[in-house]
Every structure is written in C-alpha cells, then in structure tokens.
Amino acid sequence: MSVPIAAPAQHRQSGIASNALSVLNSVFGLPAFRRAQEEIVRHVTNGGNCLVLMPTGGGKSLCYQLPSLLRQGCGIVVSPLIALMRDQVAGLIEAGVKAAVLNSTLSFNEAAAVEARLLAGDLDLLYVAPERLLTPRCLAMLDRAQIALFAIDEAHCVSQWGHDFRPEYIGLSVIAERFPNVPRIALTATADELTRREIIDRLHLAAAPSFVASFDRPNIKYEIVDKQNAQAQLKNFIAERHAGDAGIVYCLSRAKVEDTAAALNKAGVPALAYHAGLDANMRARHQDHFINEDGVVIVATIAFGMGIDKPDVRFVAHLDLPKSIEAYYQETGRAGRDGKPSTAWMAYGLSDIVQQRRMIEESSGSETFKRVSIGKLEALVGLAETANCRRSRLLGYFGETPAAAKCGNCDNCLSPPQLRDGKVIAQKLLSCAYRTGQRFGAMHLIDVLVGRMTERVRQFGHHKLSVFGIGSELNEKQWRAAFRQLVAIGHLQADSDAFGALKLTETARGVLKGETEVMLREVAAGSRHRPNRTKSRRGDIAPRSADAGEAGSPALIGILRTWRSEVARKRGVPAYVVLHDSTIDGIATLRPKTLGQLREIPGIGDKKLEHYGDELLALVTAAG
C-alpha cells in the first residue's frame, strides 16, 4: 500500500508531510505525530540516512514503518527479536499493511512464499533476522527486489560496549556497501556516547544526522530499596501496589527465577518462569500466556523482555543488580509503554556489587572491556546510592539535562533521604576493614563493629582488636547501608580474588586522616516505607496504577476487555494487537454512537473500523 510522493520537486516537502499525516491517521488511527517523528519520517522518506535514539514506547517503529509505506518498494527491518517481529507484523496486518517475517521460525516452504511475495512487490514491510539477511541467498534476493529502506532496529547490538552485543550485527556494514542508494535508519532506545559512536562507525552513518529524543519516561516511578529479604519485599510490593497487574521480575540466575516464581504463585500471584534452561516450547507458551492474558507476572533472566510490545506492563522489578545503566533503562522500559503510571522497583544490596564485579573480573574480555564494564557498573551503583533525583541522574548519564532538578516521581523526590556527616562512621568502617587484614566481607566486618562474638570472630581473634564493638551505635541494617555507600563513593572496593573481601582504595587514606568529607544517607533503625499511593509529577495523589487514567465506566471497560480477549483468541494475536488499553479507555470515556465518532478515537484506523466498528458500537449501546 505504498503511497506515491507528491511532485513536482518544489512541493515535495509539503507533499510528504501531508501524505505522512494522512497515512498515520488512516492506517494507525493516530491524529498527530509525537516529538521528532514527523521530521524523521520526512528525512527518511526523502532518501536520507539517520540514527534515531528514542525511548521504549516513544514511537520508534513508526519512524520506519511510515517511510516504508510512503516510498516505493518494501521496507526491510533487521531485528534480532523474534517476539517483536511476530507481534509487530500481527499488528501491521490488523491495520491492513502487507507485512511478513523471514526468520528461523518459518519452514522452507513458508520462507519461499515470503521471498516470492517480496520479489513480486506484494510486501510493504519485511522483518528479517540479521543472520538470515547476511546469507548469500538473502542478499542475492534483495539485489533483485525493490527496497524502500533498511531499518536496523536494536542498533546498540552492533556495539561491543553496549549491554546487548550481538556478533552477527557487525556484519550489517554490508548493507551500506551493497545498497549505497537505499536509505538506512538505525534505531535504539539506549546508547551512551561510546555506543553511539560505534553504531555510527559500523553502520557507515558518519554523514547522517542523529535524532535524539528525550530519554525521559515521566510515567515511570523509579524506586530502589535496601535488599533484605528480596522475595518477601517483592511480594509486599506487588500486594500493596500492583495486585492484579501484569509485571516482569528480573533475576540473575535460573534457580532464583524458579524459586521466585514458585514463591509468587504460593502467595496467590499468577507467575511464570522464563529462562534459557527451559524447553523452547515451554518458554514460548509462557511468553504467549504473559502477552495474551491480563494480570500475569513473568519472572525471568535478562533473556526475556527484549522485543516484548505488551503495552500494559505496570511494573518491572529487579531482584538483582543489572550490569549497567543501559541495561537497567532497557529493562525498566518494558513498563508503561501505554503511557500510564507504572513502577520500576529494585531491591539492591552490597552483595550485588560484589557479584557483578566478580563476574566482570572473571570474564574472558580484554582489560579495556573490563575497565569499561566496571565503569558502567559504578555508574549504576551511583544511581542506586544517589540521594538526589534518580530521574535526573538517569537522564544525565545519557547526556540529557532534565527540565527540573526534581522529577516528583521517584522515591528520592517523594521521600527525600536525610544526609548526615558520616566521617566518623566511615573511619570506623575503614579501620575495621584495614585492621582485619582486608580479607573479609561486609557481614564479618559488621559482626566486629557491633561487637558480636561469632565463631569466626573468635577464630581469627578479632574480638581482641581495638575496633571490636566500636560501632554499637548502629545496627546491622545501618552498617550495611554505610558499607554500600562507601563502595559507591569509591573508598572501598570488592576484591574479586578474595571472594568479595572489601579492601581500601587510595582515597580511603584521606578519610582516615580526616581530610576528606563524607556525607552518608541517614538510614532509620527499623522503619520501612510502604506507600500504597504515588504522587504524580504534578504533585497530586494518584490512585494505584491499575485505575489511573480510566475515566470511563469500569463496567464498560470490563466488557470491552472481555470482547477483546475473545477476538484475540480467535485471531491468534495478542490482545493489545486488537486494541490498546488506551483505545478501550477512549471508547469507554467517549461512548461513541456512530462509526464516525468511533473513528476519531486514537488507535482506530480504517481497517479496525471496518473489522470491529459495528461490534464495538453494539457493546457501547448494550452497556447503556
């Protein structure tokens, strides 16, 4: 359904703009572009190359889908994510777009049929896995086809410094070399300056503009808590804040995934496990169940989530520290794609830093890779330990200056931590680590500081040291927080050669001599923050996220969702491919009486109006 571009040349820009807006409305049911979408669409439709950095849920897909429809030929979308390919193609077909996939899930005959459609000019968009595209057969086929553009999605995968490096992505430089006159658009939601430079270099985009949208996701509340009993904390968090909501819980190990899923199910939370150790069919079933059903929680390793377009994920929880801010941002970005209030919650402790640092040191990477990885880990620890606005810290990492110093929608803004002079505490802690030989972890050092006569303390004679019992004014929780903060500041570091022993750094000398100021966050002895409501960025009190933004009748919303589930099941597509929650909310709020009124609701394009219009109006009428 490619749309011809207006001519002559002097009318080209206005013609592209009017055609793009028309297609945006008729195909996708959207009344207007967001942020830089229109500028990007115009640039690529005109034949330009570019790099696009736009947050998850920010509308990246339209930046290549629309130009593919506006230009002659088929848009080739390179993606490593089978789930994303499948769901986006299903959504495009629902909207009346001729789309298909070419990846390992297809049989030989199915792949041959897709290839025949491409060569016959019967496709608007074709999603291709990178390893498939790089085969001589596929490249030869593309030589014979009319190509509208190449879109390299998840472009950060090309960078060895990125959080999700894929070796097969390096070969994508062949696109620029073999198809120099076909526009290329590289897209990603996460890339620091180092990663951006590598994307530009490897994909030959040095002469192309970069469109960098704001990384801010104002609907996501960022919250990081002191890890004590992570599973119990998670269960409380879900029960108090997100009961009945869809969510993703990330764990580092397969065993922890299984244990956490079992614990949630025992607590009455419908949860499924997802990790590489499961049978492929079971992984697929669990993923499909999560995508297609409401209120399911998936507990997963980081192998899960990339390419998941489910828009109504209300929370993402981390029970282990990710590797970098990029990974944290990418994973938390799975929440709230529909723009509704959502939460990014993480339980974090000193053992997480020790574990991640050990993994880096024991990896087979080069010294440069290890140094960069440790720098990225330290940046994430800084985000976890900051006493200031977390959103400002997060945006600053990506080179963005926030509009305000405080966002009003993170735990530090909502409940500002108190700072105190921590010089004496730091001196006691560092002295204890030094006098015990810098060979022990935090738990043993805390036993010495509080004067706890354990078997190990007696075994090593540490009860005879001058530091034994000098820290009795703080309890274990408070000392644990102090250790974490000194590691984050850089006065202590974990020794990967001594199984997590804490040793002093060069900067510790200044603290011990009293020359260096140390400010620490105040940690209450036993208080626990248990909010059941969250403030919005405007400062008012918002109800729990499941109800936020639902101005229409709850009864009608329930009817519409039930209808949507039935249609999705019959058509074999995720429920949100039929209609997004925001579209259902719009129908329930406006209660359209005619097809014309229904067509005005965002998310209702021409094909969806044709397929579902009469049924939706009947449901609204029946609901009174």
Image (spheres, grey):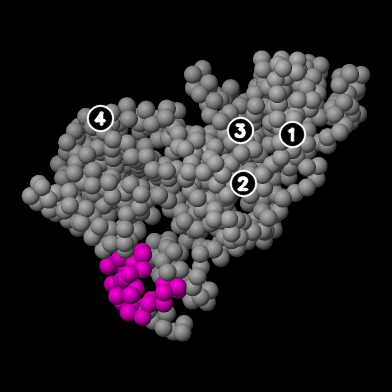
Q: CA distance from mark 3 to mark 4?
A: 36 Å
Determine if the magenta segment contains residue 52. Answer: no
Q: Residues within 10 Å of mark 3 (few under 14, many from 20)?
A: many
Q: Nearer the viewer, mark 1 or mark 4?
A: 1
Q: Nearer the viewer, mark 2 or mark 4?
A: 2
Amino acid of disc 1: Arg
Residue 499 seen in the current view: no
Left of 95 or right of it: where is 467?
right
Left of 311 or right of it: where is 484?
right
Q: Residue at x 42, y 30 (%)?
A: 193
Q: Mark 3 falls on what kind of element?
A: helix
Could you tell me residue 304's position as x and y percent?
Answer: 50, 46
Pointers 1 and 3 in contact (C-beta within 8 Å): no
The disc at residue 413 is 2
Q: Mark 2 falls on what kind of element?
A: helix
The answer to which of marks 1 and 3 sits earlier in the sequence is 3
Q: Residue at x 48, y 48 (%)?
A: 217
Determine if the magenta segment contains residue 615. Answer: yes
According to the picture, the residue beneath numbered tag 3 turns out to be 381
The answer to which of marks 1 and 2 sits earlier in the sequence is 2
Which residues fall within the magenta stretch? 587-616
Pointers 2 and 3 in contact (C-beta within 8 Å): no
Residue 409 seen in the current view: yes
According to the picture, the residue beneath numbered tag 1 turns out to be 420
The disc at residue 207 is 4
The answer to which of marks 3 and 4 sits earlier in the sequence is 4
Q: Is residue 528 above or below residue 583?
A: above
Amino acid of disc 4: Ala
Left of 582 or right of it: where is 43?
left
The answer to which of marks 2 and 3 sits earlier in the sequence is 3
Amino acid of disc 3: Val
